[in-house]
Amino acid sequence: MWEVHSSMAAATPVWIVVVIVVASGVGALGFYAGYEYRGSPAAQPQLVENQTLSVLAAGTLTSFFPALATELAAQNPGTSAPAAAQTYEGSLDVTSALTSLSAKVDVAAVADFRLIPALLEPAHASYEVVFASTPEVLVYNASVSAFSGITSSNWGATLLGAVETPGVAPFGVWNASTDPNGYNEIFDMMLQGMLYGGGNVSAVYGHFYQGAPGQYATPNPSVTRIEKESQAASLVRTGVVSAVITYRSYAVANHLTFLSLDPIVGLAANNSTALTDYAELSTKIISSTGSLSSVYPAPVLFAAMVPLNAPNPALGAAFLHLLASPEGSAVLSAGGAFTPIFPAWTDAPAAVPPELAPDVTALPAWASSFVP
């Protein structure tokens, strides 16, 4: 359900990949909360000694992956994982870095599980590991009186009323052509209208975006402000914007006030009703060539993989192994940020390294319908 004609990034960023130096002793990974590191590549020190680990991941993961890298280093004397050891950007920028810029990293992770099969396989990856879910939520400035009484059923009208109030900052939106959260917020608005606006998908969407549903969506400049999602917390706290739609994981990690949306609206549901509603909607984003590609709603699922050109694939697999462990789950689920998935899901069980096989299982049927 993803129409792709080229690498889908609107701009070509300059990539600086910072690495984690991993010395000997990685084989010391052992037990945590009764979990045994079963045959991980990290159990073979000769594969990782004096090598380095590079990570390129979705911006939202900047509050979570560094903690895992730090824990990996803490368990293994001689390893180093400074705060600046990974690079994080929009997920479509991540895929563009791997395809158009030929970036070489050991682990890549994105905020939309469809991107790896659609844009990176088979030339740049042979499998993905879907490791967690998190819904979309509405983050808002609680000091703005216009948000008083906001609920999951009335947030569309309340948000519009707030940003149309003199002195209230606009609604922050993201670039849908570089960041899945950009097109997800469009779908959130469409679904809110579908479920709470008499079936009219433009009931909320039409106030914040210009362009018919299913076509390219241009943010309405009178009530929105285009910003970078990575700056959302600062934007809300400093009053540059009054509200944003973002992942619950981001809101929790940054201690922001947020409203949970209807599970279908927040792209958390995967029941038959939700999947039917998702199938009715689409929007278009700009590809790197300037052409338009159609995207469709799907439950928010984060996925990671080891690129085929990874300098140190064993290290990449070891990181995925840690990510899938109870230790990784504890980091991801802190405060209710993510809902970890274990065993993690993979689109290609036969392609997963034997060392990771105990950590994964095949995508469920409903999820498989979203990938090529």
Image (cartoon, helix red, strand yellow):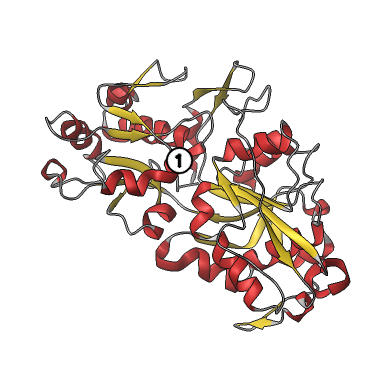
The answer to which of 76 and 344 lies nearer the viewer is: 76
Residue 60 lies left or right of residue 149; in this view the side is right
Q: Quadrant of residue 121?
A: top right
Q: Establish if 200 lies above or below 353.
A: above
In what quadrant of the picture does the C terminus appear? top right
Residue farthest to the right, as pictured: 46
Amino acid bearing label 1: Ala
Could you tell me if residue 85 is visible in this image? yes
Residue 177 lies left or right of residue 48; in this view the side is left
The percent coordinates of residue 191 (x first, y second) are: 37, 33
Q: Residue at x 63, y 66 (%)?
A: 81
In what quadrant of the picture does the N terminus appear? top right
Could you tell me if residue 261 is visible in this image? no
Task: Give the class, few, some or many, for how many residues have Cα within 10 Å of label 1's Cα (few <14, many ≥20).
Answer: some
Q: Which residue is drawn at 20% across and 32% down?
A: 163
Q: Residue at x 72, y 34 (%)?
A: 101
Secondary element type, mark 1: helix
Q: Establish if 370 lies above or below 351.
A: above
The answer to which of 28 and 303 lies nearer the viewer is: 28
The percent coordinates of residue 300 (x first, y second) are: 51, 46
Q: Residue at x 50, y 34 (%)?
A: 297
The answer to which of 83 and 324 lies nearer the viewer is: 83
The percent coordinates of residue 138 (x first, y second) are: 31, 45
Q: Mark 1 points at which residue?
A: 274
Q: In which quarter of the image is residue 199?
A: top left
The percent coordinates of residue 337 (x first, y second) are: 43, 60
Q: How many labels does the image show?
A: 1
Q: Establish if 102 lies above or below 126.
A: above
